[in-house]
Amino acid sequence: MAKDKKVLVVGGGGRCHAIVDALSRSPQVAKIWCAPGNAGIAAQAECVPLKDTDVQGLLSFAQKEGIDLTVVGPEAALSVGVVDAFRAAGLKIFGHTQAATRIESSKEFAKILMDKYDIPTAGYRSFDDFQAALDYVNARPFPAVLKYDGLAAGKGVVIAADAAEAEAALRSMLLDEAFGKGRVVVEDFLTGPEFSFMAFVDGERVYPMPLSQDHKRAFDGDKGPNTGGMGAYTGLPFIMEEDRAFAQKAILEATAKAMVAEGCPLSGVLYGGLMKTPDGIKVIEFNARFGDPETEVVLPLLESDIYDIFEAVATGRKASEPVWRNAVTLGVVLASKGYPGSYEKGAEILGTEQVDAKIYHMGTKRDGDRLLTNGGRVMMVVAEGKNARAAREKVYAEIAKIHCDNLFHRRDIAHWALDGKILDGKALAASIKDELRDRVGKLEVKYGRKPSLAVIIVGNNPASQVYVRNKVKSAIYVGMNSRLITMAEDTSEEALLKMIDSLNRDPEVDGILVQLPLPKQIDEARVIDAIAQEKDVDGFHPLNVADLWLGRKCTVPCTPKGIVRLIDESGLDLTGKTAVVVGRSNIVGKPVAKLLLDRNATVIVAHSRTKDLKRITLQADVLVVAVGKVNVVTGDMVKPGAVVIDVGMNRDAEGKLCGDVDYVTARLNASWITPVPGGVGPMTIAMLMENTVECFLARIDPQ
Ligand code: NDP
């Protein structure tokens, strides 16, 4: 194959740099020009000082240089009709006509098309009258999705949380005409992870690219203002192959066919901004060109000759199916401090030549030998790995070599793929309680009596009051009989023991729980000993403790039992795994260790003040932390992929409930993690209900 083709790429950002980079790998391409290009592109193409919307200038240049093929990056160039002009002049160009570009430039056109051809998307209505739009929005549940119907540089979408936000947005779009005169599309709010599915499209021919996901918010944890994109990655674990196949057929191929039927066939990139909703995959938006920053992570995986694909689409010839490397790419945008608000330009960037990863320039310029920042998003560093974790480690290691006073970047790109999934104790506890409620109803029919729980609280410790109330509330929900016995702060040990004794002898009582801690005149150990073993729903009685350690049938204490159930939810098989328990109280740390041993884990029980606790915790495939102190474990102490169970319940400086584990940093390494509140706490109560039912059964039907 002769290496003699001349290519002009229109555009200048990171996306065009990735296109130029892919073209420079083509065995057919001899020379690339880029208009206007940028300082990074200049290393691989000759930059031409022409604006991407200067149709006449671009056309004359292509004719003068004898360009074989022109490739258009940005939507602005497409919507001013650069493709139509080139085609009219008999030049080969990759990109959609002005008519086909409406799939992006008019939200209403796209919505009508999807409606007409049954392409799954959110319900909508469109308005040009401010009052009518406001009335419609206010009559529907919030949040409301408001989209300006036209090109608005990615800033024309507002998710309004309430009536005031909606009114302000509609006012700016329809009355103040912030983006020009136009209409507003009001859409139903959908939930689920969003992802991007791009394809090269030539009429009805669709050549899909790998899926990717970008990160729109400026800061870690998807916080802060919306941006043009702060990073992206490929290899999305939450999209199954059947989802992908559905999206290809029912969305991309269906849309390509629809556009042909409408008389405006596609001949470039169709970008589906999709969402995996509880009702299936739906379209959030279409774009008529490569996505930015998705292109920067997708194109590096292309093994085929991109010139061949571009040329085939531009001329309506069938291309051979593109081949993509089976790896994961992950890219992180380095942006000027202040972006997406105001920022300074001209800061020097050092160290890029040391970087062993792709760097796509977005807003840079050269000043002699010096590389300077020259935009909001400055560059994107893209690394490849066999999986997302490897790619992430690599990209951040390479970024560390780049030095600039005025750049920042997100540290959690691909968190959807990598960071700990939440072990939702609240949801699990709710489903356990629902099952128990069913069971209790049946037990009453069978035995003529419901299980019954007696809860004693002595004194007025506010935390204890809350716990006790929650326990009684749950007992009522499950349908059990419950009795709350409140005793004064100065109750004597004798009076309490007498109360326990009467409950021990009451045939109608199946479970007795004394809320700890107790006022200091009362010896906790004596109280626990006094509860009849068969009514000890907490599992604290010495005979229950002994039975637990001897492997006999017994009441298993609630919190440890709940912890193991949460670990089971993660799907981890504990056999041969290392479990580390930090904290060694009799009610949590020690019994949890025994339960984990019973699951064939190797268990280390650590003193919370162990010197170099990190050395111990880093061995843990399962890490249970039950100390009662804020930040006993931080992210750097968590082995990548570990299941982390945070038992602690503490108040931070602002009085907010928090655990023993620094959730934000630990989540970056954990594969699963329990939140506080909402993890172990609700499970403890659900297990108490289960224990009460078991004690009832053991008493009423000892078989
Ligand atoms: P304890 O106060 O009983 O124990 C905390 C630490 O005290 C232990 O890690 C240990 O420290 C020391 N300790 C206590 N008892 C012993 C003992 N018998 N032998 C040796 N050392 C001991 O706390 P809990 O285990 O009751 O609770 C820990 C955290 O979990 C608290 O924040 C609590 O609020 C929370 N919790 C949450 C529950 C829930 O449902 N979510 C239920 C129960 C507790 P060291 O290892 O440093 O010596």
Image: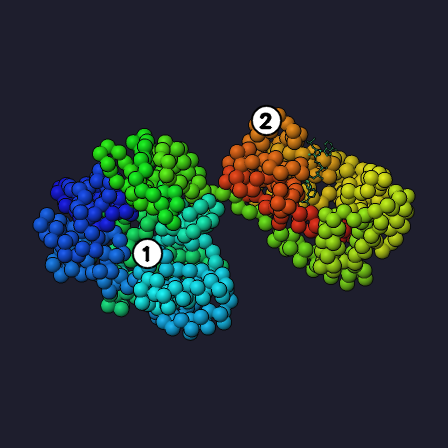
Percent x, y for residue 125?
40, 70
Q: Is residue 606 left or right of residue 446?
A: left
Percent x, y for residue 567?
60, 43
- Displayed quadrant of residue 55: bottom left
Q: Nearer the viewer, residue 413 or 91?
A: 413
Percent x, y for residue 199?
30, 54
Question: Crowdedness of circle 1 by 10 Å Cα count: few (<14), some, many (20+)?
Answer: few
Amino acid under disc 1: Ala
Ligand 1's quadrant: top right
- Identity of the residue drawn at 21% across and 53% down: 52
- Identity of the residue drawn at 79% across and 53% down: 453
Disc 2 residue: CB within 8 Å of ligand 1: no
Quarter that holds the N terminus: top left
Q: Are marks 2 and 1 in contact (CB under 8 Å)?
A: no
Q: Is residue 497 visible?
A: no
- Tell me the colour scheme of the image: rainbow
Badge 2 element: loop
Q: Nearer the viewer, residue 386 or 185?
A: 185
Disc 1 residue: CB within 8 Å of ligand 1: no
* Residue on which disc 2 sits: 612
Amino acid under disc 2: Asp
Q: Is residue 110 left or right of residue 144?
A: left
Q: Considering only order in the chain, which callout, 1 or 2, is on the residue closer to the N terminus?
A: 1
* Residue on which disc 1 sits: 153
**261 shown above or below 655:** below
The count of marks equals 2
**455 shown above or below 120:** above
Q: Nearer the viewer, residue 255 or 8?
A: 8
- Identity of the residue drawn at 59% across and 39% down: 661
